[in-house]
Amino acid sequence: MLLQQILNGIMIGSVYALTAMGATLIYGILRILDIANAGAYVAGAYFGWYIYLKTENLVLAFVLSMIITGLIGVLIHRFIYAPILSKPRILPIVPLVASVGLFTLTGDLARLIAGPGTKAYNVDFGVDVINIGKLTIVPAWILIIVLTALLFTVLWLVLNKTKLGLAWRATAEDADIAKAVGINTNSAMALSYILGYGFAAAAGIMVGILYNSITPALGEVPSYKMLSIIVLGGLGSPVGTVIAGLFIGLVETMLSAYNLTFIPKDSVAFVALILVLLIKPSGLISKTNKI
Amino acid sequence: MREIVRIEGLKMYFGGLKAIDNLDMSIYEHETLGIIGPNGAGKTTLFNVICGVYKPTDGKIILNGQEVQGSPPYEMARKGIARTFQISKPLYDLTILDNVVAASGIHEYTGIRSFFKKSHTKEVLEKVHDILELVGLSEIEHKKAREVSLGYLRRLEIARALATEPQLLMLDEPCAGLSNFAINEITELVLKLKEQGKTIVLIEHNLPITMKVCDRIIVLNYGQKIAEGTPEKVQNDKKVIEAYLGEEDED
Amino acid sequence: MGNYLITVAVNIAVFSLLALSLNIIIGYAGQSMMGHAAFFGIGAYTAAILTNKGVNFWLALLVALVISGTLGAIIGVISLRLRDDFLAITTIGINFVLVAMFQNMKLFGGSLGMAVKPLILFGKRATAIHFLIILLILILLVCMLIRKMNRSWFGLALASLRGDEGAAQSFGVNTSQYKILAFIIGTSIAGLTGGIYAHRMTFIFSSSFAFVVSISILSMVVVGGVGTIRGPLVGAILLGAAPELLRFADDYRMILYGGVIVLMMRFQPQGLLGENSFVMNKIEKYIIPLLKRKGGESNA
């Protein structure tokens, strides 16, 4: 049923958008692709799982996990990326390789600490499914869609209505000029990490609840899918990321629902990325023509 | 004098912006041609079109009787058009010497065949040492490019361009951002090259220097040629004065 | 040598070849290749499928080399249109997608893996020591090849490409052509290595070519020293032997790799033995003068 698939697609797409948002916010300011963001997704899922296991309080699990992961993000920026990026004339692969290293590190830390096996989330919503006409809705879907909408609203408000958000937008536009006119670019960077890693953590928990399982390999697929989405969404554009995330979620769901996949489902985003890059190498944006 | 380059009806549009609009000009052998104009006049765009960085929207660039417009930069370089960059582009990992050796291999980069040909041969090193001597980089030839100052990097740019044995040497603001002392040194160098009979095209913001070294000057404004002639003639041209005054007003 | 030592040595030799070949793409040409293990896998599966069908081992190796090199050329062509970070994502993605294909397609044996017909050399089944000899000869050849490259115009073209593409083009380097060539050389060596590896293992799984393997190879290059011959070799030996020496720490291997990569990028992005690294500076300061003094005395 089409409506059912659309709903499914929106739900998956919301998670994608949320996961990719962190990478977008970080790219917007630092101009690096932070693959470690997929590590934050894993870390967040595990923090959330542990907190929920101990407290059975889902709200607390979300809030605490997002805060802890966000703060870790700030520390990673402060002690790893910032010093690397401050060196003159580094090869562009240096921060990227560092982020790949961080990503590997997180997945394996999760395996060592929590064990290699699957962990179940077992969140009890009271009902298994809600049937509205022919439509079948799993309670977790509502949670995901509502929470994603809420988080994006918060993000929009922070970026557009606060002084810090103004600093963020100015730094994203041109970091040198922003610095020159006295904007605190460091706080903009910290904002990117705390929000970026926090959002990834929330996405990790959502996926854990949705499939009722998390594993240390949770971040593998998102690591490149999320990057495909931020490129499709026009690198550094939060709105574009939401649209691209929903788009990929819908396309994937439709293709597998109607058995149109001749490639593994998880490659859809990636194939879309290659097509876009080949047709429009700069990604989907080209703001300026250089003279 | 023999005409090396002729440009006919050259247009370079970026969307609605006409960076170069219907330009005709020639470059003659052994001359030093200055290209001046206020900011945004299209000087650097013109350079980039001649060097193959941009494909012109329309028009012809004729090098020794052959149409060459639209060729990629490496082809233009092999055909004899060498350039320097205003923002120096040294190979930071390499020594000054290796930077110039790399440039002297202009006709050696033939793909897989270049694997089987040694680069630092005696002849190559001799040639490169002569160039380093000429531009005054001999003493620091073993330093990495990342360790030397901007003044030296500008000379390195010129050395690399010379190593390609060009017919036409295009210098993009070689004095920009340098101290007076370094400016004098670069000016001396350009005069030395001129004495050797090199054909030089120079973009330079520093008007006194342009007037001092150039035989002929072309003035651009809004992508069009507004004056052309000897430094004296151009200096007294009403349109040129207006163009430059206009710029000062805007500032 | 005991069997165990030979097994470890073969493993190190395989990774030396992979690290040396990745270094051509990353260290010399400066291209962000993050999916080297995919090409290792392409070579392994190609050679395995062929010899299983009765094709001669050496011919199968050659085909493995050609096919992985051809696919490498395609990545090279894609790289022309992508900036560094996009290329990195693309190659990571290719690694994941290929492993998914190895795992899911019948042609590659599916999730159970694939048996490979054992190699018969001189009428007998080849043992680890034979493979070690083949691999060592190859390492020697590849090192000589890179040395030759470094002294040729080809090497300068790659250095220019890595340094600044605009500058490289300004003195006649067709940067696109050299990028593609670097990818072809690097990936075809990886494919060749894969072909040998498959016959050594006689059974291959998709997981041997996963993204984490690409990361292991990458760590060897960056730990040893990007853009040198000694670097990848030392990196492969150090990181290849470490899990064996620290058997008890096998569980910590990926953490070790991840952590080491991060620390190296943070403090010594040029690698332990890269140019201007802490170790090399010390060697230049203390050891080279020592050697020179000895040389001077013998001359006098």
Image: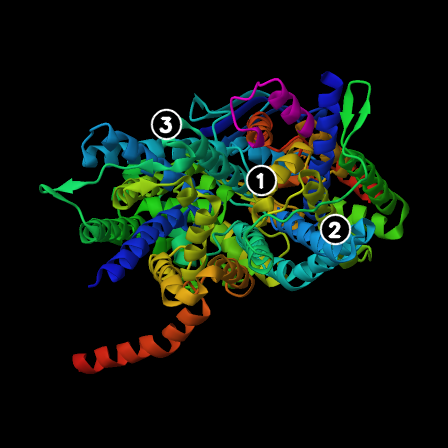
Residue at screen point 54% across, 33% down: B53
Nearer the observer, C26 or B10? C26
Q: Secondary structure at mark 3?
A: helix
Disc marking residue A131: none
Label 2 belongs to which residue?
A: A198
Residue B244 percent across, percent down from the top left: 76, 40
Locate residue C257, reporting x and y percent: 48, 59
Residue A73 covered by magenta stretch: no
Place residue A145 in its image quadrant: top right
Instruction: Specify start and end residues of the magenta stretch as a single range.
Output: A249-266
Question: Taken as a whole, is the magenta stretch helix, strand or loop?
Answer: helix
- Residue A221's tag is 1
Task: Mark 3: give few (<14), some (14-19) or many (20+) Cα within 10 Å.
Answer: few
Write the residue at 51% across / 34% down.
Answer: B51
Q: Nearer the viewer, mark 1 or mark 3?
A: 3
- A253 vs A52: above or below: above
Q: Chain of mark 3?
A: C
Residue under label 3: C107
Q: Amino acid at mark 3?
A: Leu
